[in-house]
Amino acid sequence: MSTPAPTPTDVPARPPCVLCFNASDPSGAGGLSADLLAMASASCHVLPVTTSVWLRDSRHLHGHHALDAEWIDDQARTVLEDVSVAAVKVGFAGSAHAVAAIGAILSDYDELPVVTYLPELAWWTDAEREAYLEACEELLLPQTDVLVGNHHTLARWLLPDWEDDRPPGPRDIARAAAVHGVSYTLVTGAVRDDGIDNHLASPELVLAHVRFERIDATFIGAGDTLSAALTALLAHGSELGEAGAEALRYLDQTLVNGFQPGMGHAVPDRLFWADDDDEPDERDPAEKP
C-alpha cells in the first residue's frame, strides 16, 4: 500500500527560506558553501543561486567563470515563483551583466530585506572591477538594505577622494553608501591598537559595535559568513541592531574556532557550536586539526 501524501496539517512549520546569489567555491571557504553552513546554523533553508564558478584552493584564486545572466535570472525566478522567501543575500555576482539581472529581480520583489556583501576584487583586472562596481552602484545598491564589507574595501570604493588625516569612520562610510540608496552598512576589520572594530551603522548612528581580539591567522570566507548570518537572522524577523550584534558574535566564534583545511589560509568553523566539547576551541587557526 502506498503512503499517502502529507496534508498541509501534517507538515511541520518550515524554517525561513533565504535566496542566496553567490559563487560556487570548491575550497568550501566562501561563496555558497559559506552561505549554506552559516544559514543552516541559524535554522534557515537556503535557496542557492549559482552566479559563477571559482577555481580556488585555500591558497589562491586561480580562475573564475561567470555564468550567463540569463541562467542566473532563470534560477532565481523559478524558485521565487514556487517558494515564499523571507530575505535575500547577494554575494559575488560574477559580472556586471549578472549584477543588472539580480538588480532587476530585486526590484520585482522589493518587499524582501536584502543584504549585499562586497568581497575584495583586487584579483580582477581594473576594467572588470570598475564595470562591476559601477553596476553595483547603479543597479544593486538602490535595492540593498544592508551593505557588508571590509573597512578598507568599502572606504576605497565609496570614498575614493577621502583626504582627511583620520581614516573614515563607520558613519562616514554609511553616508557614502546612503548616496546610492543603502540604509545601513556593516563595516568590518577596522584595525585598532587593542583589536579589530566592527560597526553596523546608518548615517545618523551606530546600531551595533563588536570588537574582536586579533587572531594570528589569515582567513578566507569571513565576509560571506558574516553577511549570511545577518541575512538569516533578519529572515527570522530579528531587529536589525540585535541581528547585527549577534551575527558579529557568531563570526567571532567561527574565527576563534577556525581551522586550516589545506596548505593555505584558515577557514571559519561555521559549525563550531556542534563540537562535543563544552569549552570553546582555543587552538591556533593556523594549525591543522
Image (spheres, rainbow, N blue to C red):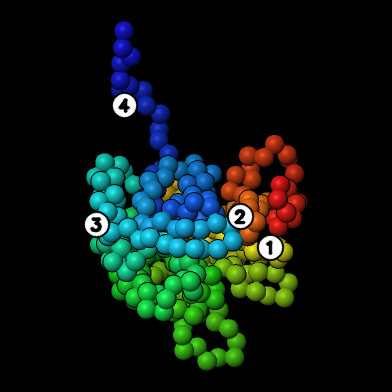
Structural distance between the alpha carbons of marks 3 and 4: 34 Å
Residue 4's place in the image compared with 25, above or below, is above
In the foreground, 269 or 162:
269
**In front: mark 3 or mark 4?**
3
> Hey, what amino acid is under mark 2?
Val
Q: Which residue is mark 3?
A: 70
Structural distance between the alpha carbons of marks 2 and 1: 10 Å
Q: Residue 10 occupies which quadrant of the picture?
A: top left
Q: Residue 178 occupies which quadrant of the picture?
A: bottom left
Q: Which residue is mark 1?
A: 217
Can see residue 241? no
Which residue is rendered at x = 32% and y = 58% of the image? 67
> Hey, what amino acid is under mark 3?
Glu
Q: Position of residue 241 (x, y in %)?
A: 51, 60
Name the side, left or right, on which 197 lies relative to 62: right
Q: Earlier in the sequence, mark 2 or mark 4?
A: 4
Q: Which residue is mark 4?
A: 8
Which residue is rendered at x = 31% and y = 43% of the image? 84
Q: Position of residue 27 (x, y in %)?
A: 53, 52
SS assignment at label 4: helix
Name the side, left or right, on which 267 lies relative to 65: right
Residue 80's place in the image compared with 190, above or below, is above
> Hey, what amino acid is under mark 4?
Pro
Q: Earlier in the sequence, mark 1 or mark 3?
A: 3
SS assignment at label 2: loop
Task: Bin the neighbour count of mark 3 within 10 Å (Cα to Cα): few under 14, some 14-19, many 20 and up.
Answer: few
Task: Bin the neighbour count of mark 1 within 10 Å (Cα to Cα): few under 14, some 14-19, many 20 and up.
Answer: some
Q: Residue furthest top?
A: 1
Q: Position of residue 242 (x, y in %)?
A: 53, 56
Q: Earlier in the sequence, mark 3 or mark 4?
A: 4
